[in-house]
Image (cartoon, helix red, strand yellow):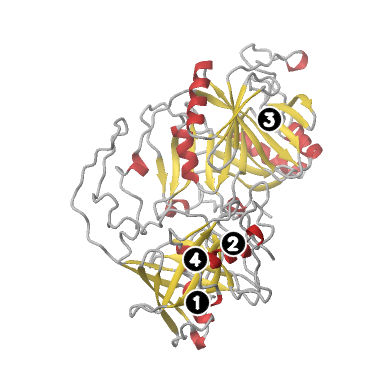
């Protein structure tokens, strides 16, 4: 095996363990098994990982920053520590390596690794390891079960929303505050007030809070030889984040993207005046509405049957491997572009600007954000179009000029203020309602839609650690047009579902019968969401994409100072509005499938 620049990996190999913690996979090495010279060590690690190629084909990396992490562990020379733990983050496309941050996910496996490799002995029913985090010079004490002198990975500690259970690992952090900035509070003030209109922020400080120990617990489980480890990060008495550890193997793969320091667990959602809950954002109205979506399918004929015969869309032209379809109340050329492809997923989402001037304003903001692709001739029925991406990589097109649909013959409605005659076929959905994207992280995309495109968050899910796992955003009075949901795989550019609205809630019940008769797979519903109060039915079209049939009950938002409605983990654990438990596949199925 060779790495970047032909760096050789020793012929007799390098001993390591491969484990996965949460969203991170990592290689665990004894420092003594690696070259003493840091430059030689880094070259070897980059070669083993295959960094320097986007697919990491010449190594064991996972072609993603979350699969490019390394832990270097050694006996500590400090009197107050047993183990030194150095974390290294490797690049994917570029052969880079950095030690500028810690990784709590990989930290969860350091104690068990130290016992497995004989750095410390197992102590009775449980073992305590004092770990010196070299990156930040901080200390953490890990306590985990070792009955009979062996690390126990199986256990009954469960975390809401995560399948399976595992044995807990208790992590006690000591004096970690200020490890990156030198202060408990980075600016020195408990509260900072930023004047966004000024060139410099104005801060208002209040007395600083005392330092405290941080405690966390990590349930950990391990499979049999060559199986998987699974670990959960959990605060005592509360929820946390599941971390999976992979069984030691002869070869290794690691991973992890540099991420924000994990916040100390909060016992409840921030108060009503906290910006996470009460930040009101005005709508710019530069984007009028969701225009259309291009859906990919490996089963073009069967997918076309589904959308025309089951949902009741009307075909309005074709080009190459694509077919243009429209709902009966859409004034534009098409609502859906269905394209034959090797796999499922969404290629592009169309947004219509509210004017030519609005289009130019949004393009300028997108280009300033560095996410523009460029202008192109519009698709069928659409004028000049500007392509861009959101922070997660989903592709969009923004346009103003559009061709109004002119029906004739049997498609001409009796009432001239209706776009097309009611088809009376299948479900007969009325319009394309919204698109729900899966993203590695929700918040950067929500910030982009609100800050750059001029949308607004109407509702969101805020986890116990303060992070946002899902957001619903709108551009006009309809309560949501785009949704972002955390992708449990950490992948980018995937689709959760697209949704079509029906006239009434009763149409959703009728749709369930139609899908049952036509052999369409029903995932869940009919039922009512708590979030947005949407009446729903979720099905899979033949290409594998999830489709929602929904009726939002004409829920509109007129308040100009609307602030996001935030839902807690405890509230979401109750299920849907009438108590229906959320089906597990709702959190795991997305397109395209993850290999």
Q: Earlier in the sequence, mark 2 or mark 3?
A: 2
Residue 489 percent coordinates (x, y): 59, 54
What element does badge 2 sit on? Answer: helix
Q: Is residue 179 visible?
A: yes
Q: Earlier in the sequence, mark 3 or mark 4?
A: 4
- The residue wearing badge 2 is 46
Residue 567 percent coordinates (x, y): 42, 47
378, above or below 188, in the image: above
Which one is in front in this view, the residue at disc 1 or the one at disc 2? 2
> Is residue 588 left or right of 88 when viewed as pictured?
right
What element does badge 3 sit on? Answer: strand
Q: Earlier in the sequence, mark 1 or mark 4?
A: 4
Residue 202 percent coordinates (x, y): 24, 38
- The residue wearing badge 3 is 336
- The residue wearing badge 1 is 112
Asked whether disc 2 touches disc 4, contact meaning CB atoms under 8 Å apart, the reply is no
Asked whether disc 2 touches disc 3, contact meaning CB atoms under 8 Å apart, the reply is no
């Amino acid at each position: 095996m060779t790495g970047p620049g032909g760096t050789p990996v020793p012929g007799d190999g390098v001993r390591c363990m491969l484990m996965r913690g949460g969203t991170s996979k990592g290689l665990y090495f004894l420092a003594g098994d690696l070259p003493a010279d840091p430059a030689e060590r880094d070259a070897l690690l980059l070669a083993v990982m295959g960094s320097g190629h986007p697919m990491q084909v010449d190594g064991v990396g996972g072609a993603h920053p979350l699969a490019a992490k390394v832990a270097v562990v050694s006996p500590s020379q400090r009197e107050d520590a047993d183990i030194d733990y150095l974390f290294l983050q490797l690049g994917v496309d570029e052969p880079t390596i950095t030690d500028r941050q810690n990784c709590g996910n990989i930290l969860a496996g350091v104690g068990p690794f130290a016992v497995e490799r004989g750095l410390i002995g197992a102590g009775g029913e449980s073992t305590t390891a004092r770990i010196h985090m070299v990156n930040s010079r901080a200390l953490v004490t890990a306590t985990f079960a070792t009955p009979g002198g062996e690390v126990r990975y199986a256990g009954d500690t469960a975390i809401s929303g995560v399948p399976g259970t595992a044995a807990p690992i208790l992590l006690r952090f000591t004096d970690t505050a200020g490890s990156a900035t030198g202060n408990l509070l980075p600016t020195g003030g408990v509260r900072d007030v930023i004047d966004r209109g000024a060139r410099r922020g104005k801060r208002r400080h209040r007395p600083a809070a005392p330092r405290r120990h941080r405690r966390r617990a990590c349930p950990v489980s391990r499979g049999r030889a060559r199986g998987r480890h699974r670990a959960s990060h959990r605060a005592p008495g509360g929820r946390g984040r599941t971390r999976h550890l992979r069984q030691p193997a002869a070869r290794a793969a690691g991973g992890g993207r540099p991420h924000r320091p994990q916040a100390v667990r909060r016992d409840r959602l921030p108060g009503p005046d906290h910006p996470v809950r009460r930040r009101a954002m005005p709508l710019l109205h530069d984007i009028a509405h969701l225009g259309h979506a291009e859906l990919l399918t490996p089963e073009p004929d069967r997918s076309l049957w589904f959308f025309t015969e089951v949902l009741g869309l009307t075909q309005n032209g074709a080009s190459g491997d694509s077919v243009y379809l429209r709902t009966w109340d859409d004034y534009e050329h098409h609502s859906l572009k269905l394209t034959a492809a090797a796999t499922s997923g969404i290629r592009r989402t169309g947004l219509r600007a509210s004017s030519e001037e609005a289009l130019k304003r949004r393009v300028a903001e997108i280009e300033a954000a560095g996410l523009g692709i460029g202008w192109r001739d519009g698709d069928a029925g659409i004028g000049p179009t500007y392509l861009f991406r959101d922070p997660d990589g989903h592709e969009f097109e923004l346009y103003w000029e559009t061709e109004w649909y002119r029906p004739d013959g049997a498609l001409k409605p009796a009432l001239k203020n209706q776009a097309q005659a009611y088809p009376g076929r299948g479900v007969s959905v009325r319009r394309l309602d919204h698109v729900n994207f899966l993203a590695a992280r929700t918040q950067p995309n929500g910030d982009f839609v609100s800050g750059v495109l001029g949308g607004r968050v109407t509702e969101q899910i805020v986890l116990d650690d303060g992070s946002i796992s899902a957001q619903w955003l709108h551009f006009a009075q309809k309560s949501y047009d785009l949704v972002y949901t955390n992708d449990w795989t950490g992948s980018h550019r995937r689709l959760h579902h697209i949704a079509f609205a029906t006239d009434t809630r009763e149409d959703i019940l009728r749709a369930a019968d139609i899908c049952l008769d036509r052999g369409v797979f029903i995932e869940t519903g009919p039922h009512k969401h708590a979030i947005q109060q949407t009446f729903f039915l979720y099905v899979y079209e033949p290409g594998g994409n999830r489709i929602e049939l929904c009726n939002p009950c004409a829920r509109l938002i007129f308040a100009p100072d609307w602030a996001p409605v935030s839902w807690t983990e405890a509230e979401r654990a109750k299920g849907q509005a009438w108590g229906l438990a959320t089906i597990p596949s709702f959190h795991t199925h997305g397109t395209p499938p993850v290999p």
